Image: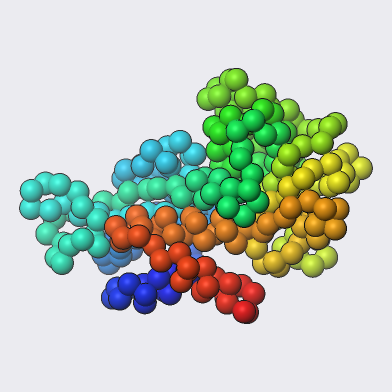
Amino acid sequence: MHNAAIAALGLDWRYLAFEVRPEQLSQAIAGAMAMKFVGLNLTVPHKLLAMDMVDVLDASARAWGAVNTIRFEAEDGSGHWRPISELDEIPGRVRSHGFNTDADALVQALSEDLKVKLAGATVLLLGAGGAGRTAALKIASERVSKLFLVNRTRSKVEAVAAEIKRLWPEVPVVLGYPDKPVDLVINATSVGLKPEDALPLDPGAFSITKTSAVYDMIYRPAETLLLRQAREAGARVANGLGMLLFQGARAFEIWSGRAAPLPVMRRALERNVYGN
């Protein structure tokens, strides 16, 4: 989607993928900065690690405790920090500026793909890892009426609940499955990536028939077992393609300072992921 956007706007850029081990992340960021990259995207498990590796944290990264986008900036002749993309030459020092585009992308995807408004909703969130933690914090900030958190490792979900209680004490958080229907179920785990995967929730503890909307952050396969069963039960369903699109579009705007060509990026994503 980024290379499609780059082509659409006529930029002399190229978006490339690099495999980087966690213990080499700091070196990789420094190397990209030394080579005057415009910026970077980071994926699991680098988003949390990068919090301590960038020179400056945007308010979005500080709020959600993770960095998925880095913009490299240079100090111009007047001593002002400007994105490298705005400069023909790099006259001074260069720094890394960390952002988070995941949290807002989730809310936008829920609104546009499922027509769900989080304010006042009851939500069951599956997963408290990197994606789950960011999702939980963002969902709580939207003032849901109750948030249920389920995670395989109890200590992780307890830590997320404690963080929410500190930041938004008015939002009720329950560890475990609801005993009544909820407005929305979100899967922030990796369960569903493989064809042989079971459901990411315990059907004995909570039936998928007890919700009217299900969002799975997984986008490949397009329909996980969770989404299929939810669709067959009559719920509105959506996969993670929208979230991927919106976080990518925002990252593109952070790097380029220009509006992202969303239709172009969406078509490129759909061709790549679904082959159509």
Give percent across and percent down for residue 187: 70, 49
Q: 123 left or right of 90?
A: right
Q: Is residue 54 above or below residue 238?
A: above
* Colour basis: rainbow
Answer left or right for 99 relative to 117.
left
Name the residue nearer the viewer: 87 or 157. Answer: 87
Visible residue check, residue 63 = yes
Residue 91 x, y percent position in the rendering = 12, 59
Q: Quadrant of residue 275?
A: bottom right
Residue in the image at 80% along x and 57% along y = 231
Most extreme residue toward the left is 77
Q: Can you tell which quarter of the image residue 185 is in?
A: top right
Identify which residue is drawn at 46% across, 60% down.
Answer: 248
Q: Is residue 90 left or right of residue 220?
A: left
In the displayed structure image, the side of residue 103 where residue 233 appears, left or right:
right
Tell me where residue 36 appears, x and y as whole percent. 26, 64
Query: At 41% across and 66% down in the image, what residue appears?
Result: 261
Q: Nearer the viewer, residue 119 or 103?
A: 119
Image vertical order of residue 70 relative to residue 263, above or below: above
Residue 11 x %, y %:
29, 73
Q: Is 15 placed above or below 116 here?
A: below
Count every numbered label the image shows and give the total. Answer: 0
The answer to whether residue 130 is visible is: no
Q: In the displayed image of the protein, which residue is found farthest to the top?
A: 170
Q: Residue furthest bottom?
A: 275
> Residue placed at 45% from the left, 36% from the top?
63
